[in-house]
Amino acid sequence: MLDNSGQPVAELISVGKRFGGTWALRDVSLSFHGGQIHALVGENGAGKSTCLGMLAGRHTPTEGGIRVRGHEEPKLTPLRSRDLGIGAVYQELNIFPDLTVAQNLVLGREKAGPLGWLSRSSVTGAYQSRAQQHNFLHSATQKAGTLSIAGRQRLELMRSVDDKTAMLLLDEPTAALPPLEARRLFDLVRSQRDAGVAVIFVSHNLKEVLDLADVVTVFRNGRLIATKPASEWDEASLVREMVGRSVSTARQERTSSVNAPAALTVRNLNTPGKLHDISFELRRGEILGIAGLAGSGRSTLLRALGGDLGGSASGEVEIGGKISPPSKTCVEAIKRGLTLLPEDRRRDGLFLDHPAWRNIVIGDVRRDAKMGFVSPKKLVALGREAARRSSFAETRIDAKAALLSGGNQQKLLVARTAYKQPLVLLADEPTRGVDIVARADIWRVLREHAEAGLAIVVVSSELEELMLACDRILVLSKGRVVREIEPDDPSVSTEEVLQHAFDIGGTLGN
C-alpha cells in the first residue's frame, strides 16, 4: 500500500482551466506526495500537460486553487514555482543553443557578484560539481546546440534538479530518447523518488508508465477519471479509461503489393560517415519500415532521400523509371515525387502561427488554381477535406498549429504530405509523442494511403508498431542494412530484430 497520510507536496483543489471558449480542465482535485512517482495519462488534449503547466506556474487556474506544502498559492508563477522547489522539464526543451552548457546550467539560478557579474570560474565550478553528480561527460565550454537531443534533455534535467527540489515535473520525458538514454532517465527519476521528491510525469508510453510509476491518474476530455496505484492497472484498463472503449492493436489487414510496380529503387546510397551502400526497392502500395538503434542511420536515410542533406549523399535513386543522384534540396525531392515528414514536427514541419488548414495547403496551391488564382474559401475547403481524410479533428481546422495537441499536429503533417500527392512518403517517427488512439489513427491513415497506391517508408523507434503495420522491415546497424524482415513470417520475433539492430551475430543469418 502507498502511504498518502503525510502532507502532500502539492494539491490541485477543484481546478479548472479555460483557454478562450474551451475548457482544458474541469473540477480536478489531486494530491501529489513526496517519495512517489505519479503518472498522468490520457489522450492528446485530455488535460495532462495543462495540469503540469499550472503546477509549474505557466498557467493560472480559471477556477479552483493550488496549494504547495500546505499553503495557498493564488498567483503561482514560474519563478515562484522554482523558489518553492518545483523543477520542470518539457517535451519542447528550453535550451539556449548559442550558450555553453555551463552557462545554460546556471542561467537565472546563480547569484551575481557585487558588481552584478558572474565570474567564469564560478560558472565553471557550479557546472563541474553538478555534472559530476549526474555523470554528464561534456566540457563546460561546449555549446549546448551541439548536444544530441538526449544530451540536451539531460542538461535540462540538471537545471531542474538540485538539493532544494521537492517536486519534479516531466512532460513526455522519453519521447525523443533512445532506449539506453530512457533507462538512464528512469534511474535518475527513481533516485529522486527515493530521496523524497514528488515526481509527476506525463507519458503516452503505457508500458513505461506501468514500469516506472507508483500511482497513475487517467484524464479524459479535461476531467479526472480515476487515480489508482500502478499495480491495479494494466495497459488494457488504462486504454479503456482513457478513451471509453477498447483500441485494436492487431496487425493491419492489407492488400498484397508483391506484383505492384516499383515506386522507388535505391542503389548504393552513401553519406559521409553515416550510410554505406544502402540498396532497396519499394513498390507502390507498400509500407516499408526502417528499424535500428539511435545512430544507426535510419533518419539520415530518409533525409538523404528527401533532399535534406544539401547534396552530400551519393548513389542512384530511381523514381517512376527516371534515374538520378539523390536530391540536393527538399524542393527538388518534392518535384521528383518524394515528400519528407520530418522527425521534429514543431521545428521542421509546421508553420506554428498559421491555422491548421493553411498548414495543409501552403506551398502547393498552383495545382488547384484557375488563371493563377485560388479563392480563400476554396483553400479552406481543400484544407478541410485533406484534414478529414487524415482523421484530423475538423473542429480544430481554424486553430493555430501551435495550439494543437501533439496528435493533431502529427495528423496535420500527414494531411499536408498526402495533399501534395507524392509518389513516395518518407515518414520519420510519425507516431512519436502521441497517444494510443492517435497512433492507431495515424497508422490507419497511412495504410489507407498505401491501399490507394502511395509508397511509404517509415522510421520508428517503436519496433512493435513496425511489426504490426509494415509489409517489410529493413534493419539498419552502423549505417548498413543487416537484415530484411517479413513481419508475416511467424518465425520472426521482435527480439531477433533487436539482435540484428545491436549487430549481434551468431546463428541469426546476415
Image (tube, rainbow, N blue to C red):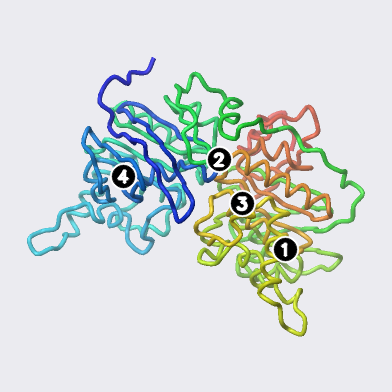
Residue 327's disc is none
Q: Nearer the viewer, mark 1 or mark 4?
A: 1
- The local secondary structure at tag 4 comes to helix
Q: Locate residue 415 relative to residue 239 in the image: left or right.
A: right
Q: Residue 423's quadrant in the figure?
A: bottom right
In this view of the protein, which residue sits in the foreground, 175 or 253? 253
Q: Nearer the viewer, mark 2 or mark 4?
A: 2
Residue 419's disc is 1
Residue hosting label 4: 160
- The local secondary structure at tag 1 comes to helix
Q: Give residue 196's position: percent from left, percent from top.
A: 28, 28
The three-letter amino acid code for the residue at tag 2 is Glu
Residue 297's disc is 3
Q: Which of marks 2 and 3 is in front?
A: 2
**Crowd band around label 2 with a 10 angstrom C-alpha radius: few (<14), some (14–19), many (20+):** many
With respect to residue 59, does 331 lie above or below? below
Residue hosting label 2: 43
With respect to residue 73, does 320 lie above or below? below
Residue situated furthest bottom in the rendering:
371
Distance from disc 2 to disc 4, alpha carbons, whole Å, reads 26 Å
Q: Give residue 435's position: percent from left, percent from top.
A: 57, 41
The three-letter amino acid code for the residue at tag 4 is Ser
With respect to residue 436, does 113 lie above or below? below
Distance from disc 2 to disc 3, alpha carbons, whole Å, reads 31 Å
The three-letter amino acid code for the residue at tag 1 is Tyr
With respect to residue 491, does 459 lie above or below? below
Between disc 3 and disc 4, whose residue precedes? 4
Between disc 2 and disc 1, whose residue precedes? 2
